Image (cartoon, rainbow, N blue to C red):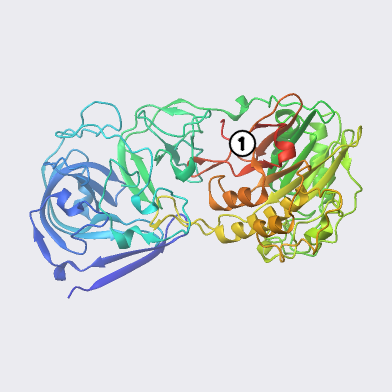
Amino acid sequence: MSSSAEWHSNDKNGNFKYRRYTVAASAPLTSAISISSINGNTFLSPFRGQNVTNIQGLVTARYRTSAFWIRSLTPDNDPATSESIKVYSSSAAARNVTAGDIITISSAIVSEYRSSVDYLYLTEWTSPQGIVIHSRGNSVEAVPIGGSTSGVVGRRSTEPPKADYTYLDNGDVFGYPNNVSLVSVVNPMLQPRLYGLDLISPPNDYGDTWVYGSHGVTGKNDHGGLTLRPGGKSSDPWMANTTRMGGTFSAITGIITYQYGYYTLQPTTAPRIISSQSLATQAPTNLHQTGGCRGLTIGEYNIENFSPRTSAGNIARIADQICNVMNYPTVVSLQEVQDNNSPTNDNVVSSDVSLSVLTQSILAAGCAQRYSFAVIDPLDGITGGQPGGNIRNAFLYDPTIVRLRNSTNGPGNATIDEMVDAAGHLTYNPGYVSPNNTAWLASHRPFPAEWEFVRGGKTFITTSNHWTSKGGGSSIQGDARPPVNGGIHQRTAQAVATAVSLFALQLHPPSGLQFRRPLTDHLFPSLQQIITTILSANYNAALLALGDFNDYDFVQPLTTFASQSGMSNIHEDQHASQGAVHVCVSELGASARSYVFVAACGREWRCQASGAACQYVEYEGECGE
């Protein structure tokens, strides 16, 4: 029997880190086999836990003083078996080897390592013994990624897959239910020509940048990034080091390895930046308001924990984007407005000072008219987010063009039937959607408001949404397949509650048709029951649902919302003709119309439109598409 020892620490991401070693003296001995055989054609090595002996190879790169990579001198030409392996050791003999050395290792233990139970295992050798250097200064030839240039002897260039991560995702990396299987348990056969687990984005906090090569890619957008497609399909990127999204590097030579939940390209020479994008080149929207219902502009912006204590630079940047990039929309839907003294955790909930600071800054940025604002202050400590912040949704609006129709703030606990009257107008304006629904625990209630034009009196309804975050999710390149989509159960419940509510707001009952019982989400948990009760309905309400939905439009919470609300995704259905409702989406921290997270551009800020509004909607936003 073998014995083991464990060492514990925390990695740079704060994750619990562990390494299990098998004592060499008691490990089974396997001699004179190839590196490709040790790696095997599955995720986990068939020799894991065993002591292998007399392995020869070429050192291709070092990692500081703690590790180096060795490559086989006799590759087997099987794309499913890697010819290289990481050797983990900081011994004097290990520190003495350098790239270009041909060495023999008399014995080493085949280990599977990961710094978190959510990550994939990385096969490596530990406790190497008897390192002998046979020659130095040998050529280290890289394997090209893409193109037709030949690389290592017996190998052609590698063309990364452009679709699925692994067959365990069943064709959809965002498939539901999540976490049906684990790579570490199934240990599937590697098929590197089919699956990307076997894009470019901003650097992260550790100076890493996501890159793709000159090979063909899927999902490339106008900013030079990669946008996720339905099923999660886009080309696999690697993490490298450092430029802004859309910038380009010279050719990068390095080691592709796996750490902190992602495949990583560790350059062996310093990459040279050829070009770098600048946020200063961001162009203003082409959408403009006309001052009437034939040219209404509506903006959407998550201003991320905004309060009077937000830095002056960020306040000025947000104000400039609303005024000069979004061209001063008639109505702006906001998320993450904090209370007046956030993040002090006390009983203060009012946000009038926060919003006044913002509207004054927008005025100072060059806008001719100061915005008014509409908001309902939440109860203390119930909306989640930063402790003491009491974040909530709000609206800014140009009072010379629109006003709240019969403004009467709701009490915060009105059910759907109490919110809408027989003519389809809001009873409480603004109000909350189903505020007592358990779907909104530690989250932000949808915030509808009904507007009427100062001239003409026509009305429309906007709803500002902010669904719960993806916190607790797993890496898209991690062990769980499909990956864990954090918060999906709560977001799905929020999708149903919001969809049923907004469906009710769209209904303008024909003369003589009355609801036989209150239309609440408790009595009508599904759209089908509403349709059964209301035998006919006239979709006359012009309704827009905007906000930060915290998921992609092809993933279950949003597909559920679309199917049950009867509303259309205006990113897909744009029928704008003469006279339009113009929607511009913005987000703090990326380019003004984009969202990027760990290399993937996506639409998490969006607008859904009712049938009456959809034919007039024109959209501009997100990820340069």
Left or right of 378 in this view: 25:
left
Front residue of 468/150: it is 468
Left or right of 428 in this view: 107:
left
Please report the residue visible at 40 percent of the width from the left and 52 percent of the height from the top. Answer: 261
Q: Quadrant of residue 331?
A: top right
Q: Quadrant of residue 126?
A: bottom left
Please report the residue visible at 70 percent of the width from the left and 36 percent of the height from the top. Answer: 614
- Which quadrant does the C terminus fall into? top right
- Seen as rendered, the residue at the extreme bottom is 1
Front residue of 160/259: it is 160
User: Which three-letter amino acid code belongs to the residue tagged 1?
Assistant: His
Task: Please indicate, yes or no, whether residue 367 appears anywhere in the rendered image.
Answer: yes
Front residue of 397/202: it is 397
- Which quadrant does the N terminus fall into? bottom left
Residue 327: image location, x then y, percent? 75, 28
Disc 1 designates what residue? 571
Residue 473: image location, x then y, percent? 50, 57
